[in-house]
Image (tube, rainbow, N blue to C red):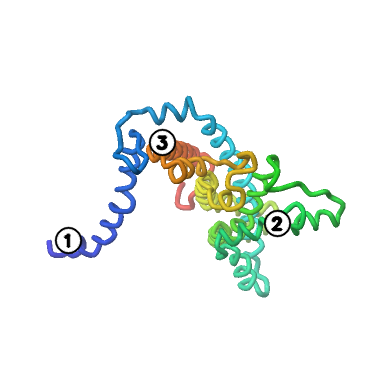
């Protein structure tokens, strides 16, 4: 009993923090989603009215969902392939590999606001570095962040700058280093080339790592907020008005906390459903070394 009390005592800071900063706000937002609440007045219970408004009477709800998924559809595959490619390069036994690994990881340490401001200058259609380089090879660069067509691709490029060489790359690198060398050597003896070894041996062995990065990558892409908020504030003409920005606008600009909470719970259900489907389908292609 004494050991149990000591265990509770040692874990109590975490338990208290969890209930105060995680579980408490979570349950509070669930309650607020069923109320009309503008911070200044007490919440007034209105049932499912906020959810009905979101699905039937909010002209920005469905477009914001579509733009969010469009951003994820572009960014996740590029980030996955790019980070895996960099991890494959850094997994080679070359001189100075440790230095290169450090250099590729450094962009992750840059504050996102500072990086977004830097990219705003680089993507400036008039004086930006990107359009200047394109002009040198005879290409007329687009408006990027000022174009309704190119704004989301521009945000994807900004996101890739950090994600390709960041934690996703480190996780891939750890998975690659865990591939048994015996399997690679056996494939080489059988006459397999570099591509065959990667496709038939390496990739199947790192499918748990691929799955982990895929799940987190989709979640992070769908809940992206900072680069859009700093770079475009949802513009131009709401071309980058993601669901996260829509929630922020209703919560902290319009102070409609009840409706913002309802939007957040709808978004949570979408993320949960996507994650659940991914886990259900993972058994078809994810291989764990300990399984038979």
Q: Secondary structure at mark 1?
A: helix
Residues at discs 2 and 1 in contact (Cβ within 8 Å)? no
The residue mark sitting in front, 1 or 3, is 3
Closer to us: 143 or 277: 143
Please tell me how crowded label 1 is: few (under 14), some (14-19), or many (20+) other residues with Cα within 10 Å.
few
- Earlier sequence position, callout 1 versus callout 3: 1
Q: Secondary structure at mark 3?
A: helix
Q: Position of residue 33 (x, y in %)?
A: 36, 36
Write down the residue under mark 3: 259
- Earlier sequence position, callout 2 versus callout 3: 2
Q: Residue 106 is drawn in which quadrant? A: bottom right
Q: Position of residue 253 (x, y in %)?
A: 47, 44
Write down the residue under mark 2: 194
Relative to 93, say whether 22 is above or below: above
Relative to 246, say whether 122 is above or below: below
Furthest-left residue in view? 1
Real-space Cα distance between discs 1 and 3?
A: 43 Å
Q: Is residue 288 left or right of residue 44?
A: right
The residue mark sitting in front, 2 or 3, is 3
Q: Position of residue 249 (x, y in %)?
A: 49, 43
Q: Is residue 133 left or right of residue 155?
A: right
Residue at 69 percent across and 46 percent down: it is 146
Write down the residue under mark 1: 4
Please tell me how crowded label 2 is: few (under 14), some (14-19), or many (20+) other residues with Cα within 10 Å.
few
Residue at 59 percent across and 46 percent down: it is 76
Closer to us: 234 or 13: 234
Real-space Cα distance between discs 2 and 3?
A: 54 Å
Q: Is residue 76 visible?
A: yes
């Amino acid at each position: 009993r004494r050991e149990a009390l000591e265990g509770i005592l040692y874990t109590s800071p975490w338990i208290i923090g969890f209930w105060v900063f995680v579980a408490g706000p979570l349950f509070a937002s669930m309650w607020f989603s069923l109320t009309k609440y503008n911070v200044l007045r007490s919440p007034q219970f209105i049932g499912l009215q906020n959810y009905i408004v979101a699905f039937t009477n909010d002209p920005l709800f469905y477009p914001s969902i579509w733009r969010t998924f469009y951003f994820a559809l572009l960014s996740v595959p590029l980030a996955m392939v790019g980070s895996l490619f960099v991890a494959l390069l850094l997994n080679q036994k070359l001189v100075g590999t440790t230095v290169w690994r450090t250099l590729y990881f450094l962009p992750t340490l840059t504050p996102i606001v500072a990086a977004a401001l830097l990219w705003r200058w680089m993507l400036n259609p008039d004086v930006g570095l990107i359009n200047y380089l394109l002009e040198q090879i005879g290409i007329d660069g687009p408006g990027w962040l000022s174009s309704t067509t190119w704004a989301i691709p521009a945000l994807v490029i900004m996101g890739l700058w950090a994600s390709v060489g960041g934690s996703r790359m480190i996780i891939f690198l750890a998975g690659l280093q865990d591939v048994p060398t015996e399997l690679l050597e056996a494939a080489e003896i059988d006459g397999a080339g570099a591509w065959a070894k990667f496709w038939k041996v390496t990739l199947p062995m790192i499918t748990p790592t691929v799955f982990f990065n895929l799940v987190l990558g989709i979640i992070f892409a769908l809940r992206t907020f900072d680069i859009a908020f700093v770079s475009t504030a949802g513009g131009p003409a709401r071309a980058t008005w993601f669901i996260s920005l829509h929630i922020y606008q209703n919560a902290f600009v319009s102070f409609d906390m009840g409706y913002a909470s309802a939007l957040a719970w709808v978004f949570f259900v979408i993320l949960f459903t996507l994650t659940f489907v991914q886990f259900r389908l993972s058994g078809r292609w994810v291989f764990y070394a300990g399984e038979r």
